Amino acid sequence: MSYSQAKKKYAKIGVDTDKAIAALSAIPVSMHCWQGDDVTGFESVGGASNGIQTTGNYPGKATTPAELMADVEFAMSLIPGKHRLNLHACYGIHEGSVADRDKLGIKHFKPWVEWAKRLGIGLDFNPTFFSHANVVDGLTLAATDPKIREFWVKHGIQCLKIAEYMGKELKSPCTINFWAPDGFKDDPSDRLGPRQRMADSLDKIFKTKYDKKAVVPTLESKLFGIGVESYTVNSHEFVMGYAQSRKILALLDMGHFHLTENVADKISSFLMFFGKVAFHISRPVRWDSDHVIRQNDDLAAAAREIVKMGPENFIIALDYFDASICRVAAWVLGMRNMQKELLKAMLTPNAKLKALQDSGDFTAQLVLQEEYKNYPFESVWGEFCKRHGVAAGEEWFASVKKYEKEVLLKR
């Protein structure tokens, strides 16, 4: 079906496709840098550790800042719209000796900011509380040793300063997300103490003065991790309580809940009490495995909630890493899948369906919910991609294979 025909069909149910295309074009998704090199970073040749692990050995991963920047730039050329890049602190660019985490500074991220300026995109940031010798017995900010806690508090403070620099330089607020893998492999004898130490460490970090217009701090919860299967300090309840009491945002990650939970159902509650929702889009397979996101029911449900409650109220970022497939393809596929589900939600007459629910006409609601799924979404997606100068179908993959042959496989 042509776009003009699809436009008329949607108009009959009160949906303006041009308006939907414009709205989707205005939604930036923060693409995660760590898919490009398996969460390795530029501090050492070692892989990810301390609660983080990648599997697979697909060839061509980025090993230098220049390679990672080139791969990100190429991936973004195949994704419609203007987006952001999400950086971890371990991706600082060091000249000569590598600065330790508590000594990281603005100079280590200036090349990233200059690169982002050239592309016209914003940056988001994350302290790196893993893959380091000072992760002791699975603990960082909640460690029993005050010297270890002090090291990580300094790291968090330095990261706040770096995030402020990014936000001000790029004239776009930088979301800085705090995720720490602290926990225990087996049942602990003391559950309260580590959480008290975690809260105290976070308080020391957030006492640092920062420009709240340039920096948006978030705290991410965790269900469990590798080596900390029985107890995590930053549980969902801890993070919600801490974030609300300290007036920062709690961050939802789709992979950090039990597989029987409906993460989309949590979004409206978060919005009510926090005013804004920070959201990591991931796909768990039996555990927090961070697979490349697919157009499945979980993603569709999350996208519907985002659209119905206003995309301007959400900070959307992707979070997955797969070393068993082409890393660039994983980026492009995930980003486009996120946009596709957002567009599908925008092409749904949500106000009409809400009215049916409120009036108690659940039969009509169910029938129309199903019928609208078969409307000509692909025609509108095609027009959206056309307006942004990228391929609408799988033709983009041919470009990735060419890039793989000419660039990735020669590394």
Image (cartoon, rainbow, N blue to C red):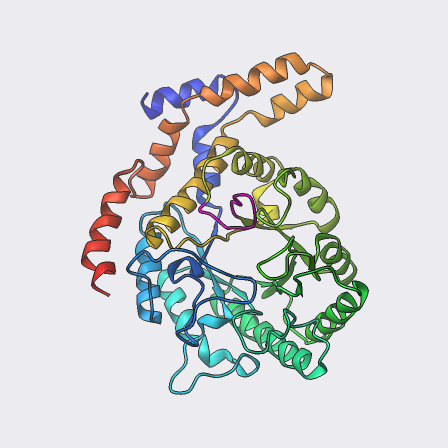
Decide which of 389, 398 is in the foreground and name it: 398
In the rendering, at what x and y percent does residue 399 appear? 23, 47
Q: Residue at x 66, y 37 (%)?
A: 265
**Relative to 252, is 238 on the left or the right?**
right
Residue at image x 72%, y 82%?
A: 146
* Front in this rendered view, residue 41 or 58: 58
Would you place residue 381 above or below residue 84 in this image?
above
Q: Residue furthest bottom?
A: 97
Q: Quadrant of the C terminus?
A: bottom left
Q: Could you say where residue 241 lies in the image, as x and y percent from the top left?
A: 77, 56
Give how far across and how far down residue 221 sits, in percent.
66, 56
The image shows residue 16 at horizontal and vertical percentages of 48, 27
Residue 162 placement: quadrant: bottom right
Q: Please provide the residue range marked out in magenta.
A: 282-292
Task: Tell me how many marks there are.
Answer: 0
> In this view of the protein, which residue sits in the foreground, 399 or 308?
399
Quarter residue 227 falls in: bottom right
Q: Is residue 171 magenta?
A: no
In which quadrant will I find the N terminus? top left
Predominant SS of the magenta segment: loop
Quick check: 116 left or right of 124?
Answer: left
**In this rendering, is residue 212 above or below 357?**
below
The residue shown at (30%, 56%) is 74
For this orientation, the residue located farthest to the front is: 186
Of 94 and 343, the residue lying toward us: 94
Q: Is-magenta flag for residue 283? A: yes
